Image: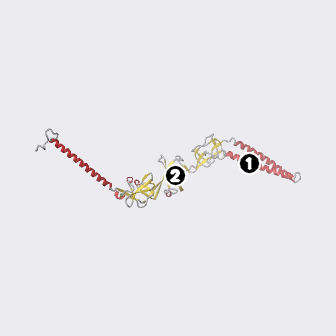
Amino acid sequence: MSKELLPAAGSWLTPRRGMWFLIVCALAIAAVLALRLTQALGIRDSNAKKHEIPTVTVTRVAVSTTPTTISIVGTIAARYDMPIGVEGDGGRVAAIYVEAGDRVKRGQILARLNVSVLEPQVANLEAGLEQARAEAELATAEYHRAESVGASGALSAEETQRRKSSALTAAAKVKVAAALLAEARARLARAEVRAPADGVILTRNVEVGQTASAGGEALFRLSEGGEIELRGQVAEQDLPLLKVGQTVNVLLTGSSHVYQGRVRLLGAVIDPTTRLGMVRVALEPDQNLRPGAFARAEVTVSNAERTVLPPTAVLTDDHGSYVLIVDAQNKVARRPVRVSGMVQNGVTVAAGLGSEERVIATAGAFLQEGEIVRPVSKESSGS
């Protein structure tokens, strides 16, 4: 080996060190090449993914005939809820004879007002009527005597006529006194608050010593006959499916007991704001069915034609319920829908979808409007 190629004496680059230097340089070059190759492959993969078309599962919109359960939400109420108050002159309540929950009969006294003023008035008018009757009897007797002696000339015709007039006036005074007495007795009778019909007392809003007046707050509320019903509301599209006489299962909040009832009345109008209709369900009286309680009822309707979609196909945001469909160009499009309820195999849709449209069944939340997809029917994906 030539002396020029060998390292000079005392140089740091010995043959061993030179070998290690070459190895380190080779490794560095290999690492740089590997990094460049990885970056190139990553860019290629990302470009490939960018142009990859996602596959989605779609289901066809179809109307099927399925048994449907309609839900009714409302409150328990008395069928005939009658407020009872003071009919005549007001006064201080002197006595109360019933409590909430008591069953009463028609005409039964519920409460009595103070009659310390009315009773003396009645007694005074009774005495006045007796006096008027006595005066009328006297005037009539004098008239009859005048008639009997008038033919003999003992009394003049003018005197006979005067006595006749006095008798008629006395008889009229008797009628006036009788009318005043009847009026006073009616006022005295109205000091007793009576039940207008047979039924159950729902509430008592009066205490002894309280001043009650006509036109004020009702003293009692009576359920006539004790009849109970559910007053609920149903969706506009469900109301035509209900019929008077259908059996209804009613549940109270916090109770698993089922109360049987029947549809008694269907509303004649739809609320334009809520799009709900009224329905009333007659129930058998029960001590646990208290007016004001929240209740939920279910009615099973057979052979109802409904558009049914999988629950995963219906999405919701700030604008309401919607589904994503695949149009003829395989692009994703949004369709607002109105959900009418739930059935055993999915969600029923009342409006918003046309026939034979392809609805994305799952993972619609990860797609965007206008995105191109590869649709696969639900039947094909399941096979």
Residue reaching furthest front?
4
Instruction: Report the side of 12 relative to 236 (left or right).
Output: left
| Residue assigned mark 1 | 178
Looking at marks 1 and 2 on the same chain, the residue that comes earlier in the sequence is marked by 1
Q: CA distance from mark 1 to mark 2?
A: 53 Å
Q: Position of residue 239 (x, y in %)?
A: 50, 56
Q: Residues within 10 Å of mark 2 (few under 14, many from 20)?
A: many
Foreground disc of the pair 1, 2: 2
Q: In the rendered structure, which amino acid carries the disc numbered 2?
A: Gly
Rendered residue at 16%/43% (across/down) = 18
| Residue assigned mark 2 | 232
Tell me, for residue 35, which label it has, or none: none
Instruction: Report the side of 130 relative to 79 (left or right).
Output: right
Q: Nearer the viewer, residue 44 or 101?
A: 44
Q: In the rendered structure, which amino acid carries the disc numbered 1?
A: Ala
Residue reaching furthest right?
153
Q: Nearer the viewer, residue 325 or 271?
A: 325
Q: Residues within 10 Å of mark 1 (few under 14, many from 20)?
A: some
Quadrant in which the N terminus appears: top left
Rendered residue at 27%/52% (across/down) = 40
Q: Position of residue 270 (x, y in %)?
A: 53, 56
